[in-house]
Image: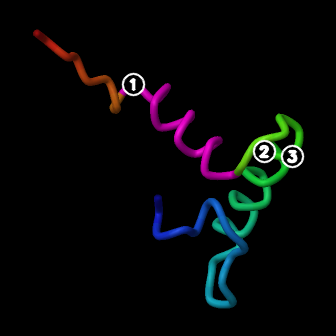
């Protein structure tokens, strides 16, 4: 997910915006006692562009 940029420590060449986003994801994960990956996945699943209908 985002090549790990939102779920792990930002690399040394990351922009300030990416570092702030990664910190916010980590803070949210800590507050919810989960992993940063779970936060990113939850956001993706809730995002309107990710809406996938499944038909059987």
Q: Mark 1 or mark 3, which is nearer to you? A: 3
Using the image, tell me which numbered label, if any, was put on residue 35: none
Q: Residue at x 47, y 37 (%)?
A: 44
Badge 1 is on which residue?
48
Gap between marks 1 and 3, in whole Å?
25 Å
Looking at this view, name the residue that lies furthest to the front: 56
CA neighbours of label 3 inside 10 A, class few (<14), some (14 to 19), many (20+): few
Q: Which residue is mark 3?
A: 30
Which segment did they paint magenta? 36-48
Q: Is residue 45 magenta?
A: yes
In the rendering, at what x and y percent does residue 43 appear? 55, 35
**Spatial distance from mark 3 to mark 2, Cα to Cα?**
4 Å
Question: From the viewer's perspective, is residue 15 above or below residue 17?
Answer: below
Task: Specify which label sits upstream in the sequence, 1 or 2.
Answer: 2
Residue at the spot 68% in from the left edge and 76% down from the top edge: 10
Q: Residue furthest left?
A: 56
């Amino acid at each position: 997910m985002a090549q790990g940029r939102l779920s792990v420590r930002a690399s040394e060449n990351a922009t300030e915006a990416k570092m702030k986003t990664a910190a916010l994801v980590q803070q949210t994960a800590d507050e919810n006692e989960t992993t940063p990956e779970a936060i990113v996945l939850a956001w993706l699943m809730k995002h309107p562009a990710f809406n996938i209908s499944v038909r059987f």
